[in-house]
């Protein structure tokens, strides 16, 4: 970067002052102020492709871009990405009143750039003597802060979307595959059921025999008992029914389907008492194919319901707020967020418990923003816990506010970095696994919804606490007044 200017400024170059007068950002300032800049600045040309600022380099100068084009790329964990671009008529670098001290990324000249550099040592005099120039630069600083905030939020959302897409694809794949498999098997099962029905009709059973067959069918179609059999118990039941079929001269192939039903050996004995060996085999085949078809339909219904519940959760999670605060159901938002993170929780065999106070009043805010907060906090908690760890989420009404706590049993946040966890780009995750923006954005969004976020941590217990006021305290929220 250029060094500080001397106490005695150079005589201004008239052609340079004319170029400043044509500058989009500062050209409307009085000419004497432009002459002041020209006399104290250093004109520098950067060749195309050259690196003009390195990442984390100290910022000492105001850049007034006169020609060419440049850009800055920032690596937030997923590789360098262009964030901002400058062309003739822009200003960048360090600006008056800016708190920026180092460059967040690497800047380069995409085309040959000609820049007037003004060292920050001149800023006190600039602020005092060049009011219009200072005002233009401060306006640009505010715009730049908004652009960076928008870029940060977009970057974090895109990374979150990538993580969610992978998890949701996994979650949806299992029930969707079950539906496809069940539908294919159902076609074959229907054909077998139709053939068995025709065979049973041709068997010439008496009215008493048909009543016995129908009683056995009704027993098969009863809702299964609420007691869930273990795999070993189920195998024993199937072996018992297969043995019974073989003992009565019936095809044992239907044993598996009958074992999945609620039929009992007593019902089968009653049926065997009124049928001979030939008609019993026909009846068993009809009962078995009917049980198989019903079981497939139940499996398809269950898998489709799972897909529906996941889609409904995603729809709730992506909540389109519009521009006006609305009543937000915190419990539903937390549940929807957990659903979209279910795959990650399963991957760590994690126990995630949600405890929502019954009748919890809604808060007034932006549901989509709050769901982004829950996503960041739950995602971080799942990252922090060990395999088979625990995450506890609670929501309670406390002192006219809704308080949400996300507690994990991970190793905790070291005391020496606890004060920095909400800083932009600060992360303890390995390279490529975090942007360092999640908690910064979570804090911005919580504040934008009129709330506060705090953290307490020790080894084995970390608690993030979000406090959101009820509707009466947040009625004045407006998109125009959002924090940046």
Image (cartoon, rainbow, N blue to C red):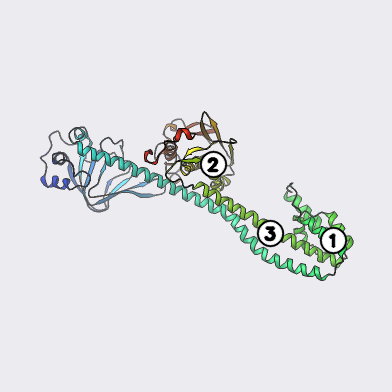
Q: Which residue is mark 2?
A: 334
Between the C-alphas of marks 1 and 2, the distance is 53 Å
Viewer-closest of 248 and 148: 148
Residue for point 12% across, 34% down: 8
- Residue 94 visible in the current orientation: no
In terms of sequence position, does the residue under pointer 1 or pointer 2 come before the other?
1
Residue for point 53% across, 54% down: 169
What percent of the width, then of the height, locates residue 288? 76, 61
The image's mark for residue 296 is: 3
Q: Secondary structure at mark 2?
A: helix
Label 1 close to label 2 by CB (< 8 Å): no
- Residue 177 visible in the current orientation: yes
Q: Which residue is mark 1?
A: 211
Side of 9 relative to 346 (left or right): left
Q: Nearer the viewer, mark 1 or mark 3?
A: 1
Between the C-alphas of marks 2 and 3, the distance is 33 Å
Outermost residue on the right side: it is 273
In terms of sequence position, does the residue under pointer 1 or pointer 3 come before the other?
1
**Image quarter of the C terminus:** top left
* Other residues around mark 2 within 10 Å, as few (<14) / some (14–19) / many (≥20): many
What percent of the width, then of the height, locates residue 100? 31, 37
């Amino acid at each position: 970067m250029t060094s500080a200017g001397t106490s005695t400024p150079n005589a201004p170059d008239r052609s340079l002052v004319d170029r400043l007068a044509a500058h989009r950002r500062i050209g409307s300032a009085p000419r004497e102020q432009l002459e002041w800049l020209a006399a104290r600045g250093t004109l520098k040309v950067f060749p195309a492709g050259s690196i003009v600022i390195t990442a984390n380099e100290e910022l000492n100068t105001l850049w007034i871009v006169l020609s060419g084009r440049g850009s800055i790329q920032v690596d937030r964990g997923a590789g360098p990405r262009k964030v901002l671009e400058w062309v003739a008529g822009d200003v960048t670098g360090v600006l008056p009143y800016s708190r920026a001290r180092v460059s967040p990324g690497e800047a380069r000249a995409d085309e040959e750039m000609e820049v007037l550099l003004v060292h920050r040592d001149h800023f006190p005099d600039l602020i005092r003597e060049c009011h219009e120039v200072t005002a233009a630069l401060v306006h640009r600083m505010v715009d730049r802060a908004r652009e960076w905030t928008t870029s940060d939020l977009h970057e974090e959302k895109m990374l979150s979307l990538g993580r969610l897409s992978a998890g949701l694809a996994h979650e949806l794949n299992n029930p969707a595959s079950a539906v496809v498999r069940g539908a294919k098997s159902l076609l074959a099962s229907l054909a077998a059921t139709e053939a068995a029905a025709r065979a049973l009709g041709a068997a010439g059973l008496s009215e008493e025999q048909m009543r016995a067959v129908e009683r056995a069918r009704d027993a098969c179609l009863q809702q299964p008992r609420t007691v869930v059999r273990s795999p070993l118990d189920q195998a024993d039941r199937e072996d018992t029914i297969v043995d019974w079929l073989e003992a009565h001269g019936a095809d044992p192939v239907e044993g598996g389907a009958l074992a999945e039903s609620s039929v009992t050996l007593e019902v089968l004995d009653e049926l065997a008492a009124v049928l001979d060996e030939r008609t019993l085999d026909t009846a068993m085949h009809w009962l078995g194919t009917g049980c198989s078809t019903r079981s497939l339909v139940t499996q398809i219904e269950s898998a489709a319901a799972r897909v529906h519940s996941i889609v409904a959760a995603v729809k709730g999670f992506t909540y389109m707020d519009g521009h006006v605060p609305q009543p937000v159901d915190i419990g539903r938002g937390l549940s929807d967020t957990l659903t979209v993170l279910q795959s990650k929780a399963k991957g760590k065999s994690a126990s995630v418990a949600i405890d929502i106070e019954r009748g919890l009043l809604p808060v007034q805010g932006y549901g989509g923003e709050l769901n982004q907060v829950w996503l960041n906090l739950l995602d971080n908690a799942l990252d922090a816990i060990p395999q088979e760890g625990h995450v506890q989420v609670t929501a309670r009404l406390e002192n006219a506010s809704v308080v949400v706590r996300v507690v994990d049993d991970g190793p905790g946040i070291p005391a020496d970095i606890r004060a920095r966890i909400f800083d932009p780009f600060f992360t303890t995750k390995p390279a490529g696994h975090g942007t360092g923006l999640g908690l910064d954005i979570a804090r911005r969004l919580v504040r934008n919804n009129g709330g506060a976020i705090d953290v307490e941590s020790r080894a084995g217990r970390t608690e993030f606490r979000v406090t959101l006021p009820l509707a009466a305290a947040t009625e004045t929220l407006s998109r125009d007044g959002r924090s940046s």
